[in-house]
């Protein structure tokens, strides 16, 4: 069934992206090509062409002797994906091969960039004459190679359904130069020497060879694809897959042409057969890329491509290799008859896949010049995709074809280098064997690879330096506008957060010297515990900010070895850390003392002897214990066991958060059977426990009807007793294995304990899980969604990113994890899919079927009424298969719709901030600034009456709408204790502490109770000073509605409810009327 679902989705995808090669389209393409041909025909023969047509290009490329007389192209033919009908929407363009005439070139024009200069000048003349026609013409480049410009021609009239269609004019040549002159070991740039010795120019030579064999290569691909529908469909699927992965579908890695080449090779080797379906070919191709392609090339340097076709071979003299590795000339005599014969291709690539060349010959090999850093990216993506097919639902269709795997979401750490105007980039010239931008990419890659060492799994360096709007004629100096982007995939958190890097042993003088030369003053000689004396670098850092070690290393290396300033380097790593700070440090740094205090409390609870039933287990419930609380409490000087009154060093908070801890007593058959009696018995036990703690260890305990608070080591622990009989009573009432959901303290405690235990285990496996959850919670609260999405729901959503990361690896940075969280919220199909979070991987097929059935029950009424859905966000776990614990009532359909819209907007903004040249901190703050004009009314609170004012991110102000109420701040409550308050004993001061006091929570509760049928309340539970209101539809009975239902009067009443706490109330929009 899963296979059938995958096939169905693939067929629908192919229908969606495959171009309809209708007569209308053919006419449109032919008309555009005819317009180009007509413009070229108007160019007079023997027109003298000089460097003045593109002076900047000729100057910067360093060419000489470039004048020639214009001759019309030898041929003009359509090629590329259009020729084999494998274009993938929405990017629709046609490649037009214009063969340059031999008469325009001299025998030695392969030297010193003369060919490239004449190629550009030839296009410049065509461009000039095309401007006289009705088409629009722009410059572009072939695979981001500035020395290989092409022309983009947009037709005068746009065909409906083909937005942005253009024809790409690509110059080609045929037998222009002798092949041996372009041997990859030969030097063809006289200025390129080292110590007076000419240097080989393999990439330069390959750049010319590409043009010489482009037409023949395309013809071969065309013959392979001809009449093979499934091969064409596989090509389309591979292009869709690649386009979703922007880090590989780029100038130095993968493109549609190379995809066609690889498919042709697999067909020639009988790796794929005519009987295969498109998805089977797709899988075989990925398996080849991921497991064999690069391994074979590295081992043998050869890649054999066969084609069962006949072609006259005497056209080319080609190079072959003898057994001793020396090149020898191979000549072919023309046969006087046509036969089917096995041929192979020589495929020379200097930069995968931008430069691809084929040479026909009888039995030669395919030499593959692979960039050192490109293979791992393709292998990584292919391997991850194969995992998607094996492990994901429906064969991984969503993950493979529908999920955007761009650099922002894929890489854990990104760096942008602003190199605009940096003459050091082209100090040796814009183009020698390779272009200066590619050389700079390699230099940056090499430095970071050496600096980060095994901290990084992959380092991707991309500089998209050519733009369509640039004028190639004016030279290359403007091609540094775009920033250079570096993406780093972390190897492991243990390596990434390592403080000390150990270098070579001190006895290895040569390696030690290299180490010191690279690291400079950062290198130091150290003796380690095992007695080893070695060079090392140390990156001292507090535990809570060790994620910045990567940034410090990269910045140090780049500043030391490149002529850059800090302003030129933008690290995308810590821009959102400000949202988690409490003052100047992250409160998570106090987690160590919190866990120690819990350990001591647990031991003391188990040691209590004077209660009828001993404490058998102690389990923390609060998010602070599992490192997912946005603001875990800091130790409070007054919340101590005993001692003297502390000296006041600074303002001290008057509020303190209690941390809930669940305890379980020994089993007994003497518990009462009634729910109320059980709760009363628990209260009696708690009082006795508090008394024992006070008597035995002098701990301060305060009791209420429901719980006991214990003051210890700067924290307040709130004790709760869980008794399993509450669950067994529910089971008997329901008569089945599934709990009937009723209000039960035991049921709630059980679910919370299960959740806490699972999340705590997950945090142990993924150290970065906690920081990502904290930022996600901060975002949810800052956009006033605290009443819609609970903390536990956020934890499960983020857990899904780590447990089911495909098509990515699990995130290893805060920003990457946060971006994926936003995309999960905005892109997941909440209406028709349940999100199953299997933390311990213990869900059986029976459990999964039960979850599916429960989900379908919640969607029964969808067809009749789209609002008639319970659990709009269905989150299923092993302890909650019906999504009743955290999302049963909220978010509802309308709340989820709003949440999705906010997540989509934030994800788009974050994506731009990562990838584009944006360093303004305000833009990053906008991720957590919610627009108050999206609400019908807004309540502003007194900031100095919030329990934790320092948690407020951005003070809220409004200068629009109708100001309907204003209030003064109450003097009864102050969030901080002043020196005047520090009078009396320690116990008296403890009594002044407000435990679990949150006026915002109480105020919102009152509003929801009093005005539940009038408006929806939106608020920030983490310290916001604004509350949003959206009206429910008002009844229009009276045009006079009942007294008190007037919106302005309602808002005034709201102000009265919050007297002393509410600063202002604004009305922005009137409610919609409903008959």
Image (cartoon, grey):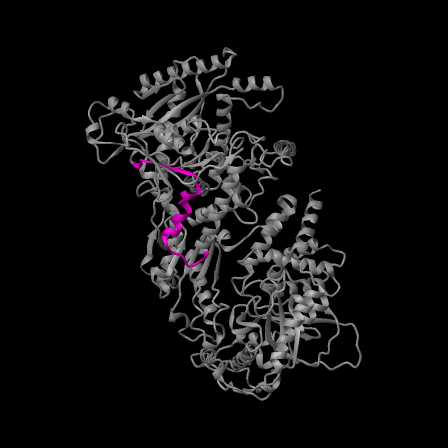
Give the residue drawn at x 47%, y 64%.
463
- Left or right of 928? Residue 268 is right
Residue 307 in the image: above or below residue 657: below
Is residue 231 left or right of 917 when viewed as pictured? Answer: right
Residue pictured at 33% horizontal, 20% vertical: 701
Whether residue 1014 can be seen here: yes
State left or right for residue 661 relative to residue 319.
left
Task: Please identify the quarter of the rendering in which residue 916 is found.
Answer: bottom left
Determine if residue 533 is in view. no
Reply yes or no: does residue 934 show up in magenta. Answer: yes
Image location of residue 583, percent across then percent down = 30, 41
Q: Is 362 covered by the magenta stretch?
A: no
Residue 375 in the image: above or below residue 991:
below
Instruction: Identify the image quadrant of the C terminus.
Output: top right
Q: Nearer the viewer, residue 534 or 232?
A: 232
Tally the marks.
0
Q: Position of residue 312 (x, y in %)?
A: 73, 78
Work out which quarter of the rendered image holds the N terminus and state it: top right
Q: Is residue 818 above or below residue 1056?
A: below
- In the displayed structure, does residue 719 sit left or right of residue 375? left
Residue interval drawn in magenta = 915-943
Query: Does residue 29 lie above or below 967 as drawn?
Result: below
Q: Position of residue 26 (x, y in %)?
A: 69, 67
Where on the picture, by quarter, is residue 662? top left
């Amino acid at each position: 069934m899963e296979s059938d679902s995958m096939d169905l989705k693939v067929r629908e995808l192919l229908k969606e992206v495959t171009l309809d090669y209708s007569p209308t389209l053919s006419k449109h393409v032919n008309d555009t090509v005819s317009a180009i041909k007509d413009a070229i025909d108007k160019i007079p023969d023997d027109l003298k062409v000089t460097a003045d047509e593109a002076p900047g290009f000729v100057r910067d490329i360093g060419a000489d002797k470039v004048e020639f007389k214009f001759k019309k192209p030898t041929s003009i033919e359509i090629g590329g994906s259009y020729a084999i009908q494998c274009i993938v929407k929405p990017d629709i363009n046609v490649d037009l091969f214009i063969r340059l005439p031999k008469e325009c070139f001299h025998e030695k024009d392969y030297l010193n960039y003369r060919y490239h200069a004449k190629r550009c000048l030839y296009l410049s003349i065509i461009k000039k004459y095309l401007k006289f026609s009705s088409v629009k013409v722009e410059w572009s480049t072939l695979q981001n190679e500035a020395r290989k410009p092409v022309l983009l021609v947009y037709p005068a009239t746009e065909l409906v359904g083909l937005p942005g269609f253009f024809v790409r004019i690509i110059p080609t040549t045929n037998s222009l130069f002798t092949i041996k002159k372009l041997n990859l070991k030969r030097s063809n740039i006289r200025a390129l020497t080292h110590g007076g010795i000419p240097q080989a120019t393999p990439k330069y030579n390959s750049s010319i060879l590409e043009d010489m064999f482009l037409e023949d290569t395309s013809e071969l691909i065309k013959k392979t694809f001809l009449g093979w529908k499934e091969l064409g469909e596989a090509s389309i699927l591979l292009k869709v897959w690649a386009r979703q992965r922007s880090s590989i579908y780029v100038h130095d890695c993968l493109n549609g042409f190379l995809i066609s080449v690889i498919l042709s090779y697999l067909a020639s080797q009988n790796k794929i057969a005519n009987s295969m379906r498109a998805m089977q070919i797709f899988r075989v191709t990925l398996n080849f890329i991921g497991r064999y392609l690069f391994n074979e090339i590295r081992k043998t340097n050869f890649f054999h491509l066969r084609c069962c076709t006949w072609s006259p071979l005497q056209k080319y003299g080609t190079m072959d290799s003898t057994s001793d590795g020396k090149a020898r000339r191979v000549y072919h005599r023309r046969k006087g008859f046509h036969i089917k014969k096995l041929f192979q291709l020589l495929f020379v690539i200097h930069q995968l896949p931008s430069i691809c060349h084929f040479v026909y010959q009888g039995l030669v090999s395919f030499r593959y010049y692979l960039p050192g850093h490109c293979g791992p990216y393709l292998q990584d993506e292919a391997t991850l995709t194969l995992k998607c097919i094996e492990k994901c639902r429906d064969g991984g269709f969503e993950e493979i074809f529908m999920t955007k795997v761009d650099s922002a979401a894929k890489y854990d750490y990104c760096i942008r280098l602003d190199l605009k105007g940096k003459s050091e980039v082209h100090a040796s010239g814009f183009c020698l064997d390779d272009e200066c931008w590619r050389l700079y990419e390699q230099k940056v890659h090499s430095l970071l690879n050496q600096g980060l060492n095994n901290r990084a799994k992959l380092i991707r360096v991309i500089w998209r330096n050519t733009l369509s709007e640039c004028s190639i004629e004016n030279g290359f100096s403007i091609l540094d506008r775009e920033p250079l982007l570096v993406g780093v995939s972390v190897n492991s958190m243990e390596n990434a957060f390592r403080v000390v890097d150990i270098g070579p042993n001190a006895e290895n003088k040569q390696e030690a010297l290299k180490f010191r030369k690279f690291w400079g003053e950062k290198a130091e000689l150290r003796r380690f515990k095992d007695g080893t004396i070695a060079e090392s670098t140390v990156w001292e850092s507090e535990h809570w900010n060790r994620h910045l070690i990567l940034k410090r290393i990269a910045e140090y290396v780049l500043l030391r070895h490149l002529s850059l300033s800090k302003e030129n380097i933008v690290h995308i790593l810590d821009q959102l850390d400000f949202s988690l700070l409490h003052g100047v440090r992250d409160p998570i740094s106090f987690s160590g003392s919190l866990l120690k205090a819990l350990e001591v409390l647990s031991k003391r609870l188990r040691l209590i002897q004077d209660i009828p039933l001993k404490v058998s287990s102690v389990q923390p419930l609060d998010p602070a214990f599992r490192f997912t609380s946005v603001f875990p409490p800091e130790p409070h000087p007054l919340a101590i066991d005993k001692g003297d009154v502390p000296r006041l060093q600074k303002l001290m908070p008057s509020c303190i958060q209690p941390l809930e801890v669940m305890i379980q007593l020994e089993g007994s058959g003497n518990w009462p059977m009634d729910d109320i009696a059980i709760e009363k018995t628990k209260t009696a036990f708690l009082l006795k426990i508090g008394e024992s703690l006070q008597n035995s260890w002098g701990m301060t305990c305060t009791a209420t009807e429901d719980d006991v608070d214990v003051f210890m080591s700067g924290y307040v622990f709130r004790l709760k007793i869980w008794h399993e009989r509450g669950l067994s009573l529910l089971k008997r009432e329901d008569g089945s294995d599934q709990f009937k959901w009723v209000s039960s303290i035991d049921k709630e405690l059980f679910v919370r304990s299960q959740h806490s235990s699972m999340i705590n285990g997950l945090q142990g496996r993924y150290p970065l899980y906690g920081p990502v959850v904290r930022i996600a919670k901060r975002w949810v609260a800052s956009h006033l969604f605290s009443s819609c999405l609970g903390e536990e729901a956020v934890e499960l959503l983020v857990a899904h990113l780590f447990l089911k990361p495909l098509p990515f690896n699990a995130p290893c940075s805060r920003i990457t994890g946060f971006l994926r969280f936003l995309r999960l919220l905005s892109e997941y199909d909440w209406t028709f899919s349940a999100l199953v979070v299997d933390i311990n991987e213990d869900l059986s097929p029976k459990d999964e079927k039960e979850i599916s059935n429960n989900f379908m029950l919640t969607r029964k009424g969808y067809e009749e009424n789209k609002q008639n859905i319970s659990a709009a966000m269905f989150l299923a776990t092993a302890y909650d298969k019906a999504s009743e614990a955290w999302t049963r009532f909220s978010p509802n359909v309308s709340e989820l719709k709003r949440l999705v819209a906010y997540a989509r907007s934030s994800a788009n903004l974050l994506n731009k901030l990562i990838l584009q040249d944006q360093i303004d901190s305000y833009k990053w703050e906008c991720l957590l600034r919610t627009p108050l004009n999206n609400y019908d009314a807004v309540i502003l609170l007194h900031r100095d009456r919030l329990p934790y004012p320092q948690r407020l991110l951005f003070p809220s102000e409004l200068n629009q709408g109708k100001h309907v109420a204003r209030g003064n701040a109450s003097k009864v409550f102050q969030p901080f204790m002043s020196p005047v308050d520090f009078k009396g004993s320690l116990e008296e001061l403890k009594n002044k502490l407000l435990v679990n006091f949150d006026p915002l929570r109480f105020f919102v509760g009152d509003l929801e109770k009093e005005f539940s049928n009038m408006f929806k309340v939106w608020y920030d539970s983490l310290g916001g000073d604004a509350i949003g209101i959206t009206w429910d539809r008002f009844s229009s009975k009276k045009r006079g509605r009942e007294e008190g239902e007037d919106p302005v009067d309602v808002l005034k009443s709201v102000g009265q409810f919050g007297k002393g706490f509410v600063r202002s109330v604004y009305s922005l929009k009137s409610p919609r009327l409903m008959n």
